[in-house]
Structures are given as structure tokens and as C-alpha cells.
Image: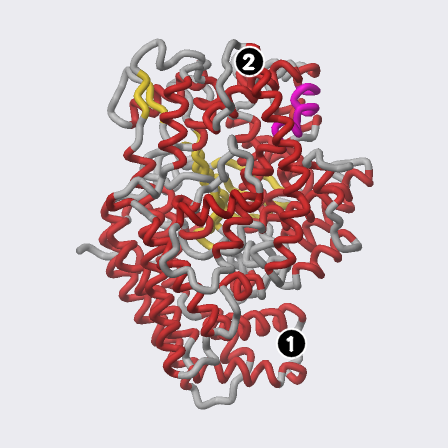
Amino acid sequence: MTANPMLADWTTPFELPPFGEIEPAHFEEAFDVSMADARKEIEEIANQEAEPTFANTIAALEKSGEQLSRVARTFFNLTGAHTSAAFQKIERDISPKLARHSSDMLLNAKLYNRVMALWEKRETLKLDDEGMRVLERYLKMFQRAGAGLDAAGKTRMAEISQRLATLGTQFSQNILKDESDYQLVLETDQDRAGLPDFLLGAAAEAAKERGLEGKHVITLSRSSIEPFLQFSTNRSLREEAFQAWTARGEKGGETDNRQIINETLSLRAEKARLLGFENFAAYKLDDTMAKKPANVRDLLTRVWAPAVSQAREEEAKLSQMAQNHGENHNIEAWDWRFYSEKVRNADHDLDESEIKPYLQLDNIIQAAFDTATRLFGLTFEEIEGLPVYHPDVRVFEVKRDGKHVGLFLGDYFARSSKRSGAWMSAFRSQHKLDGDVTPIIVNVMNFSKGAPGEATLLTFDDARTLFHEFGHGLHGLLSNVTYPFISGTSVARDFVELPSQLYEHWLSEPEILSKFAVHYRTGEPMPKALLDKLLAASNFNKGFETVEYISSALVDLEMHLLDDPSGLDVAEFERRELDTIGMPRAITMRHRIPHFQHVFSGDGYSAGYYSYMWSEVMDADAFEAFREKGDAFDPQMAEKLLTHIYSAGGRQDPEEAYVAFRGRAPKIDALLEKRGFAA
């Protein structure tokens, strides 16, 4: 092998990964070498004879493993956004090794004793607030990993971590294979009946990417299948596509995830018991704003009742609409979006195909940038010719007051090498521990690309997704902390969605839409009448959306409250829980268990899918602060938002951070009003 670029100093502009030089095989050597180096650094910190100080223990840990972090960030960004069989093989091999590496550090008794010693004498260390917070978080991390267990307990914790890493990787790869293997080829006019030009153009591009030039293909990417379900008049094809979409991960054969789920839940429950918790949900929530499962259930059930009531009213309207069109069948899950579009058109004189020409991808990107300029003084300049991992990726330099803030990468289009969904990640996080390190942030989407020479057009939901992920991106870009451990989005899971969900509000501001929602052919702004109708319909179908989300969150919670999940029949459990909460028959969970990647592709949102709604209580209340000022861009509120939320990382307890911004704790009333459920 030639010199390994993953182990060399990067001389690329802004020290971007040299993507053009990187091959999958480079990562095998890079992981081995960087893990060995990191282990050596950890051992030196743990075994030093000097008494523990913040500098020789905590700050030293913060500086250790820098090369391993660089290798891992690059690798896992690629496996999510542009993977291959070679990458997947390495991922299956390296995931348990990385878990073992992490366990070796977190279960190191000498290291834990040094951290504990610092904590016990913390009042004498003269730390600033940020340093104290980092020390507290390190102690909590060690304890939650099992550092206080006996030898047998530590051994078992390490085994569990490795196995869970393997299972999470396999779960993700199974979903990606199910998604990339499926294609609904539209051969005839009957197959394509009802589909608007923008969807046919995207379907032609999808076909071209899959080697079927001249045909039309619907994929399991949400931006492909949802508009197909919305517009296709071919009910049998809607059913076929919907069944394939909801059956991901439970089709039998090598990509079936049900046994993986069973083993994952059992191992998580065992891990929780080892650490003295009754179940995994209790363990996971102990380190969040919610604190206890009962608090999560209270919030979700409070919103569930009005959501179901509204969803049933919505279903009655859909049934009436179907009858008006001579259809007497029950409304099924594959009918909901189709008839919802017709009801929305009837009730609000609003048609998705009428809106979409005004929502060009490039303009919505600029709208997100312009909002950040007005709120936080940021500027964005696109730079061509920088190394990227795929030709579709765009790079922007972000500045404030003329000074470099960081790089923002936008990867917007669906492809078979990319997992589904939308997310923000970092190739490098901000910190000031060893010089002023600026962030490199990426947003990854799965929008359907427009036909050659045509603009890529978004639905309003797509546009909201872009604003959401850019809110996460700003959380990473605007971070202004000393320590990597609390940089950017390194906050409580049920707080991390606040900056992203709050940012969505600005998309709906008339002054943003009137400026950036312009027709892709004529350049004319969206007519005020259409804009007014769009905003007036903001809560249309909100019962459906809320029910599909909360059902997923409640099922996630209940799975992780099980004392003994071994032998669980996943499908039967899902059916039983949905029956218990009174799930409307014509609505499915937003994420059914066998493809619930938030929960089983790693444990980031395990027992934590509720976090979106927990954060929504805050985001609705937070935007109300701007409304109270009478200005969505009020400079005083924007400065407080920057100081206490977007730039603060995890330097403060999240409840304290919110109160510092708002002046009080959040109230649920704004959320209920936002979703149209207020009394």
C-alpha cells in the first residue's frame, strides 16, 4: 500500500479529508495504528505517578486519541452517506473493536480513580464553570459505562458493548440493503397515472441511477415514496409500494432484523441491571432532562389524546372524499396521503403540485443561510474545487464579522449508497483546548434530484427538513467552547433537538417565504394568496402526523421498560402496544420496529425517540419569545439565543440553559397551540 492519507498530515484547504486519495483499505491500517496510539496515550495518563490534576487527567484525556477521532469521523460519515461493500465489510469488523477500545478506557480502574479523586476535591481546583461541567460529565460517563463495577461486571459490560456495536451495524446495513434492492418500475401509463411532472422527473433520474434509463422508478427514499403515495391514482401500486416501505427489516432471510432487535433489547436490559437500574429506559433517561420514564409517558399521553381525536376527524373527511370519488372501501394506510391531498385541495384550495414549483432546493438553501445571517451575522460563500466524497456535495465557507467560523458541507440528493433519512454530522468539532479549532459540519439529505437541466423542487415538508438539519448544523458551527467533550451538539438527547426544531419556525415566516419562494421557471414570487393558503394550512393533517410520531415514541419507551425482553415476538409486541394505546387502524407508526434506525442503529435515541416532542415543548415556547417581541429577528432575543443555546454546547445544564435564554421554564401550551390542539 502507498502512504496512507488517513495517517498523514492533511495539507488540503481547511484541512478537509483528502477524499480523492482515500480508499476503503486505508481505514483498516488507520484504525489499527490510531487505536494503538490512543491506547498508549490512555495508559500514560492512567499510570502516571503524579497526583491527579485537571490538566494531567481531564485535559489530557481531551487531547488524547485525536488521530483516532479523525479517522473514525471520516469513516462513519462515509459509511452513512456514500458506502460500498468494501466499507460495509470494514464497518462490521471495526465496530466491535471500537466498542472494545472504548470499554478498555472507561473501565480502566486507575483512570476512573483519578477522575473520582478530582471530583472529590473539586471545590479546591479553582475551575471555571465550563471546567467543572466537563469534570462532572467525565465522571458521569465513567460511572454509566460501569467503571464502578467489580471485575466480573466490567468484563460482562465490555462483552455487551462489543456485541451491541455489531448488532447495530448489522441492523443499519440490513435496512440499507432492503432499501437499495427495492424498486417499483413504472412501465405503463396506468402505472404512472396521476403523477405530476416533478415526480416523474425524479423517478426518471432514479431509474437512470439504477441503470434503467428511459424508465421511471419509485424507491423507498421518503422523498420518492411519499409523493407517490400522495398522487398515484393506481391504488394497487400504492399498496404494493407502501407494504414494501413498511416491511423493511422484516422480510425474512438475511436482512431480517427481528432477531437482532430481540438480542439488542435483552443486552440493553442486562446492561441496565448491571448498573443498578430496573430497566434500560430508567438507565437511559437518568441522564436526560426527562429523568424518568413516567415523565416521558406523561408528556406523550397528554398530547396523544387530542392527536387521536383530531386524526379520527381527519379520517372521516378522507372517507367522505373517497365516497365522493365513487370509492366505498375503508381508508387504508396506503390511501391516507392520497385522499389527504384531495381534502387539503378542497378545504384550503391548496395542491402540492401548485406549491412545489416555488420551492427550489437552491433557494431554500439560501433561505436557511439568509435566516442565519439575520439572526447571527453569518455569511456563506460557496467554494468550488475542494475535495469532497461525492460530486453532489457542496462546500461553503462560513464567516462572522469577516472571520472564518467553519466549513459547511451540503449533501442533498438521494442515492443507493446513502442510508435513508436526514442528519447532521461533523468531520471536525469546534474547541479551543489546543488552539482555535474550527468545525467542519455536514448536512445529509435524501431529496429526489430533478431531471437534467431542471431545478430540484421540494415539498414544504422537505423544506422544513432542510431547515431542521441546518439548525443542527448551526449548533455545530456556532459552538464556542474550550473542551471537545461538550462541543456543539454534545448535549442531552432531549435537548439536542431544540436548536433544529426551533430553526424550522423561520421557514414559515412570510418575509422568508416571500423572498425565497419564487417560481423556478418565471422567477415570480409565490402569489400572496397562495402563500396565505400555505400558512393557513400549516396544521392540516396534524393529527395524523402526531399519531404516527407519538405511537413510535411510546412503543420505543415500552420496549425498553421490559424486564426480560428475551424471546420477544417483535410483531406481536408492536400490535399489542398499538392496540393498548388505541392506534387508529389506518395509520402506521412513523418508524415500525424492524426498521427503527433511531433506536437500533446504535443507541442514540433508544428509549429516547420522545426527545423530539420534549424539545418541541421548548422550541414552541422559545419562538413565542420572538413573537412577544413582535419581530421574528429581534436582535436582543437572537443574541440571547446565540449565547445560551447555539454557541453554548454542553457547558451548562440544559434546564439552566433554557431558563437563561427564556427567563423561565418552558410551558406546554405553546406546543399544543402550534399543533392545533389548544382548547
Q: Residue at x 34, y 64 (%)?
A: 98
- Check disc 1 and give the amino acid type: Leu
Q: Residue at x 76, y 41 (%)?
A: 624
Distance Cα–Cα, label 1 vs label 2:
70 Å
Per the rendering, the mark at residue 323 is 2
Q: Residue at x 58, y 34 (%)?
A: 545
Mark 1 Cα shell of 10 Å, populated few (<14), some (14-19), many (≥20): some
Instruction: Specify whether residue 147 is in view.
Output: yes
- Check disc 2 and give the amino acid type: Gln
In the displayed structure, 116 sits above or below 35; it is below
- Which span of residues is magenta-colored? 531-542
Residue 452, horizontal then vertical, whole percent: 37, 19
Residue at the outermost left position: 1
Residue 388 lies in what quarter of the image? Answer: top left
Residue 644, horizontal then vertical, whole percent: 69, 55
Mark 2 Cα shell of 10 Å, populated few (<14), some (14-19), many (≥20): few
Q: Which residue is mark 1?
A: 127
Residue 404 colored in magenta in the image = no
Quadrant for the N terminus, please.
bottom left
Q: Of the residues under marks 1 and 2, which one precedes in the sequence?
A: 1
Residue 371 lies in what quarter of the image? Answer: top right
Looking at the image, residue 202 sits to the left or right of residue 549; the answer is left
In the foreground, 230 or 211: 230
Q: Residue at x 49, y 63 (%)?
A: 280
Quadrant for the C terminus, please.
top right
In the displayed structure, 151 sits above or below 523; it is below
In the foreground, 500 or 637: 500
Which callout, 1 or 2, points to the residue nearer the camera?
2
